[in-house]
Amino acid sequence: MIKKFSWFGLSLAAANACVQAATPTPPIQTMTREAREVAGALVAQIGGELKRAFEFSGPLRAVVVCRYSVPELSSNLARQTGWRVSRVSLRPRNPTLAMPDPWEQQVLANFDLRAANGEPAAGLEFAEVVDEPAGKYFRYMKALPVAEICLACHGPDETRSDAIKAQLATEYPHDRAVDYRVGDVRGAVTIKRPLAAR
C-alpha cells in the first residue's frame, strides 16, 4: 500500500506517477510473465485454503473460504502489485465480486469456445494492451478449470449435497455457478495493470 506524505508539496503517489510516466512500458511478454506469476500465486493460495477447508470439515467449510478468504487473498495481491487482481465468471456465484466487464466477457467466451474445441482449460490464457477512456492498460486472464473437487459445490444437482445446496442458497441467493463438469472453464483470474494515464 502506498503511504502518502508531503515532500515539497509533492505526494509520494504523484512522484511515483511521474516516474511511471517517464519509464518505458515493458514488452508484453514480460508483463504476461509477471501476470502469469501473480495469477499462479493466487490460484496456489486459494488451492491451499480450500484443501485445508476440505480436510478440516469438508465442502461446507469450503463455501465459507470462498466467500470470505478468497476475496481477501485477491485484495492482498492487488495491494502488493498495485494492479487489479480478481476472479470473474460468466456464471458468477457472487455477482458483486465476480461479474466480468465487456472485455472479460469476450475473453471468457473465447476460453469456452477453445475448451469446447479440445484445448485443456488449464492452459488457456490471454493478454493484450488495451486503450480505455481512462488510459492504457495491460490486461491478462488465466482460465480456472473445474476439477473433481469443485463438483461438491459447483457440479450438477447429483454431486451437491442437500446441506451444500442449503448453504449456497443462504450465502449466494443469486448463484449461477453450478452444473459444471470436470474440465469446464469455471471462470478466470483477471489482472488489469495501468500503463499510462491520458
Image (tube, rainbow, N blue to C red):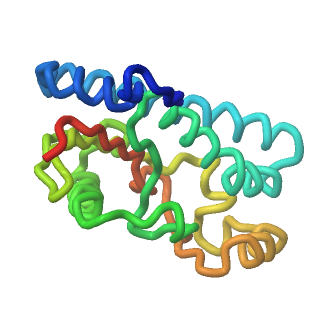
On the rendered structure, is 170 left or right of 127?
Answer: right
To which quarter of the image does residue 34 belong?
top left
Towards the viewer: 81 or 14: 14
Q: Nearer the viewer, residue 150 or 85?
A: 85
Estimate the x, y position of residue 155 in percent, counting from the top left. Answer: 59, 64
x then y, percent, for residue 54: 79, 43
Residue name at image x 73 percent, y 49 percent: 65
From what the image shows, is residue 39 above or below residue 131?
above
Q: Is residue 168 left or right of residue 188?
A: right
In this rendering, position of residue 110 left or right of residue 131? right
- Horizontal arrangement in the rendering, residue 151 relative to residue 18 (left or right): right
Camera-side residue of 69 and 182: 69
Q: Is residue 136 above or below residue 89?
A: above
Q: Residue at x 20, y 19 (%)?
A: 30
Q: How many marks?
A: 0
> What residue is drawn where x is 27% and y is 30%?
17
- Return the x and y of residue 82 as percentages of the image width and height: 41, 33
Q: Name the residue at the right extreme.
A: 57
| Residue 17 in the image: above or below residue 121 | above
* Figure quadrant of residue 170: bottom right
Q: Which residue is pictured at 43% across the width and 50% down the height? A: 183
Q: x, y (%) of residue 48? A: 67, 31
